[in-house]
Amino acid sequence: MKYTKEEVLQFVNEEDVKFIRLAFTDVYGKPKNISIMPDELDRAFKYGIAFDASAILGFGGEVHSDLFLHPDTSTLTVLPWRPLVGKVVRMFCAIKYPDGTDFALDTRSILKKAVAEAEAASVSFAFGAEMEFYLFQRDEKGEPTTITYDNAGYMDMAPEDKGENIRREICLTLEQMGIKPESSHHEEGPGQNEIDFRYSDPITAADNATTFKTVVNTIAARNGLFADFSAKPLKDKPGNGMHINFSIKSEKGDIMPQSVAGILAHINEITAFLNPTPNSYERFGSCKAPRYISWSAENRSQLIRIPAAFGEYKRAELRSPDPTCNPYLAFALIIWAALDGIKNHLVLPPPTDIDLYCAPNEQKTHLGVLPTNLEE
């Protein structure tokens, strides 16, 4: 439900809300928040709530470090894992300078600008993420270990799949928060899990991806486990991907080919944001993670594949991103790369209809290669 300011105030008053979390992310996508009491909510709406930006990674130094959080009322949700008596709610916020202008490093506002540019070009995007994570046991001091929660494999069932009840709790919690998981299952790695989302508009999809990681971390901890979203938690096992599915609508007809061509043309430079850690590059080229800059239909060895789907479910899937990325930046860069392909009428190269994991090197020499490390 999309709330107005008046409805938020009414909800807080009638539903025994005691704390309001004003949420945002740093430039790396790590969730942050400030909690305020209900009496401060009216001030938050009128003036924003100040915080020290110099203490947030990537936000700059001590000079002119006062920034303000302005809650987005449409994102109000109750946090189901907090007490039912004296509820806790959360709203995502815009980050602004004291004069009310957007803070340049507010990545949620950056995504809003990308969406606005797409709308100005009569193009609309929808995104859905496929998020993978490992569940590890904790030691007697509560510290994470590298002992996986189970030794199950792809789409195995209980009792081999011990993560079944954890995924169930995650999905039900997300549903309580108005987020619709599409499917969930055990992934290929031991202790590895995947939960996929129904597609949404870009802002909602990025909000959902950010919320998802918070929910998974919270529920894993409640069950005495550690959720690991890093790209390659175990050296000899499958890595964690964040496959990004996107669909595009335009009055100009089918612009998916030009859009995919734009993403392929810009993939090298945006990889720094889609795969932002040194560990990200240990994943490329193994266990279905892409290495080459290519596309094909229904081929999981490619960077971009066009899955088998019909009508409103027709989409493209970018397989290189991993869950350490900031989804606001990732979606914004995909939009801008696609818009560049549309604007400049870029031509999609021929599909690479071979299994790149098994093909001899001479069949791959014409293909570009993703960066092999963060410095590159």
Image (cartoon, rainbow, N blue to C red):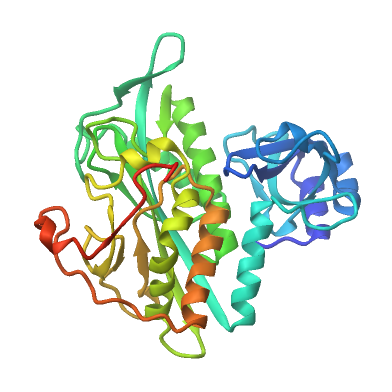
Q: Position of residue 121 (x, y in %)?
A: 60, 82
Residue drawn at x 19%, y 32% is: 160
Q: Quadrant of residue 231?
A: top left
Task: In this rendered view, identify the residue nearer to me: 274 or 40.
Answer: 274
Say if residue 94 shows up in the picture.
yes
Where does residue 153 sit, x and y in percent of width and height?
19, 39
Residue at 54% x, 48% y: name it: 326
Residue 186 placement: quadrant: top left
271 left or right of 153 in image:
right
- Identified at 44% across, 47% down, the residue is 275
**Residue nearer the viewer, 331 or 37:** 331
**Up-down: is 106 above or below 307?**
above
| Up/down of 176 relative to 223, above or below | below
Is residue 348 depicted above or below 135 in this figure? below
Could you tell me residue 187's position as x and y percent? 26, 43
Left or right of residue 4, residue 225 in this image? left
Q: Residue at x 65, y 72 (%)?
A: 116
**Residue 178 in sight here:** no
In-image side of 5 versus 241 (left or right):
right
